[in-house]
Amino acid sequence: GPTDGGFCAVPGSHKSNFPVPPALGDLADEELNQYVVQPEMAPGDVLIFSEATLHGTLPWTADHQRRAVIYRMAPATSAYGRGYHPWPEKYTEGMTDAQRAVMEAPYHPRMNRPYVGPDGECVQAKAREQFKVEFDEKVFGTKYF
């Protein structure tokens, strides 16, 4: 419900070019708090927003467990890094190579990332030199960074 806590945002903030007042960040100013909105959502609803939107989480107060799934999409050249775990095999079992390419964690194609071509086929990126791959995996501990 509307008082359970969870996701909140400041609508339109993705278009602003002003620093966030610290009192808004911790909800310390009642006047600023009027701009913080907590969308009401029903089970199964999906919320899509720009990561540039000022957003956060209000303390969870409901008796039931809160669950969220975060799915980010970005051009490969501006992808997130580190902290991704491979999908359990049971989730990708039966997928085509192109579908598995879509499910890859975000990382740059230069890291030998497969991608989906213009005809919907899985395309393997041009292989990077092995010594570079080994260096990156040794330094970062993973192929994703």
Image (spheres, rainbow, N blue to C red):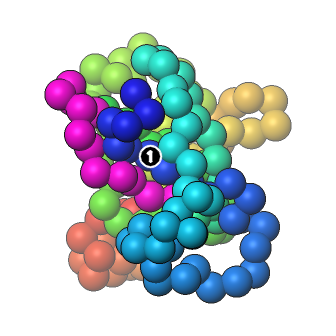
Question: Which percent across, then down, holds residue 121?
Answer: 69, 30
Question: Which percent across, then down, holds residue 123?
Answer: 65, 42
Q: Residue at x 57, y 69 (%)?
A: 32
Instruction: Say left or right for 65 vs 105.
Output: left
Q: Residue at x 73, y 29 (%)?
A: 120
Q: Quadrant of the C terminus?
A: bottom left
* As drawn, 41 above or below 131: above
Q: Is residue 1 one of those drawn in magenta?
A: no
Instruction: Say left or right for 79 vs 88.
Output: right
Does residue 127 show up?
no
The quadrant where residue 99 appears: top right
- Farthest residue to the front: give it: 30
Question: Which percent across, then down, holds residue 103?
Answer: 49, 37
* As drawn, 124 above or below 34: above
The quadrant where residue 86 appears: top left
* As drawn, 15 above or below 121: below
Q: Quadrant of the N terminus?
A: top left
**Which residues are drawn in magenta?**
55-66
Task: Please name the amino acid that badge 1 sits on.
Answer: Phe
- Closest to the observer, 139 or 32: 32
- Closest to the observer, 135 or 85: 85
Residue position marked by numbered label 1 in the rendering: 7
Most frequent secondary structure within the magenta stretch: loop
Question: Which percent across, then down, holds residue 46?
Answer: 55, 28
Instruction: Say left or right for 68 vs 35.
Output: left
